[in-house]
Image (cartoon, grey):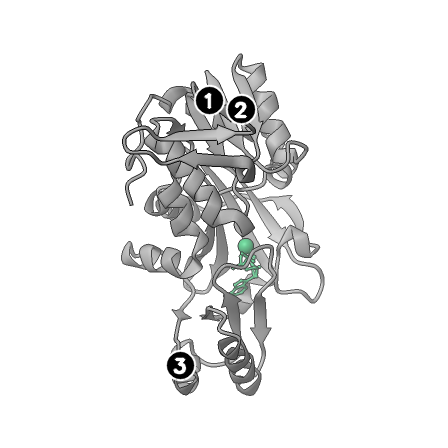
Amino acid sequence: MKIAILSRNEKLYSTRRLVEASEARGHEVEVIDVLRCYMNITSMKPEVHYKGRNLAGFDAVIPRIGASVTFYGTAVLRQFEMMGVYPLSESVAISRSRDKLRALQLLSRKGIGLPVTGFAHSPDDVGDLIKMVDGAPLVIKLLEGTQGIGVVLAETKSAASSVIEAFMGLKANILVQEFIKEAGGADIRCLVVGGKVVASMKRQGQEGEFRSNIHRGGTANLIRITPEERSTAVRAAKTMGLNVCGVDLLRSNHGPVVMEVNSSPGLRGIEGATGKDIASMIISFIEKNAKAGNTKTRGHG
Ligand code: ADP
Ligand code: MG
């Protein structure tokens, strides 16, 4: 097969591993900087061009689209889909999961466990919003933050209302969430490939830090997940429509709750913690599923 990896940097661990695994399995693979792709949107003849050449002949595309380039990256991916190239994850599924509010709404419709979450526009409603999530302490999140940046723990009601009002004043979209204290600064990353949890790890935040992100100094360890956690992760991935994703869970008093679903999960932490060759599992999934035009949407909506 001929595989394109949409990634801004071929030196990144995950990108390198996907290249290695593709080559080891006998595929031709090229890393393509999504921001250097440009598109011809002529009627019925979609094309993607790259550094002066027309990108044709790819069987599959692996999107590794960074959060800061979601808009442009998903547009390029959609263009590949319209050309009939098989996307490991579809552009609509990536857009769904990148917007934390949209993702939580979709998950709630399927009855998947979630932290109680509120969303409001007007500063006049802040008091009631705080009550809705059962008061302080509570967590305030930017809708499109990543790596723990933009996630704030407000310990008291007055801290919560000042922070919420400040974000609203800056016109930032935020959601307000029940603080799952009992998670103890840890979360569980479940890596889902093709509807199965193939690996999982526990991430523990630094001493005194409630955010477990590795980028915030968290550490990863092996963990055994429960059948309920496993099925929650699988259902969350299915709801988002993502073939490959990292589902982040918190262990709460009311069972596993999904915090977010990551459409470009990093491979370094999970391969390191579990010793598993996740990159090869991903390529093997593509081998089984990549047929021209085998997407649910083919770039629709
Ligand atoms: P990001 O996309 O920036 O990683 P997350 O929603 O995953 O944002 O939050 C970052 C971290 O903060 C999580 O990994 C978790 O450890 C902690 N966290 C987030 N939401 C909650 C919550 N409602 N209760 C307890 N801890 C939380
Ligand atoms: Mg996270």
- Looking at the rendering, the quadrant in which ligand 2 lies is bottom right
Give the left or right position of residue 285, taking residue 31 as reference: left
Q: Establish whether ligand 2 lies closer than 8 Å to the Cβ of label 2.
A: no
Q: Quadrant of residue 74?
A: top left
C-alpha separation, residue under disc 1 versus residue under disc 2 = 6 Å
Query: SS for tag 1?
Result: helix
Percent of width and height locating residue 6: 52, 34
Give the left or right position of residue 75, taking residue 204 as reference: left
Q: Which residue is mark 1?
A: 284
Percent of width and height locating residue 182: 54, 66
Whether 117 is drawn above or below 231: the answer is below
Total numbered circles: 3
Question: Is there CB contact under 8 Å for labels 3 and 1?
Answer: no
Numbered label attached to residue 122 = 3
User: Visible in this render: residue 196?
Assistant: no
Percent of width and height locating residue 183: 55, 62
What amino acid is found at the position of numbered circle 3 in the picture? Ser
Percent of width and height locating residue 278: 55, 30
Residue at image point 52% right, 15% down = 27
Question: Is there CB contact under 8 Å for labels 1 and 2?
Answer: yes
Q: Which residue is mark 2?
A: 280
Instruction: Pick whichever of labels 3 and 1 is earlier in the sequence.
Output: 3
Residue at image point 38% right, 51% down = 96
As drawn, which residue projects farthest toward the top?
Answer: 26
C-alpha separation, residue under disc 3 versus residue under disc 1 = 48 Å
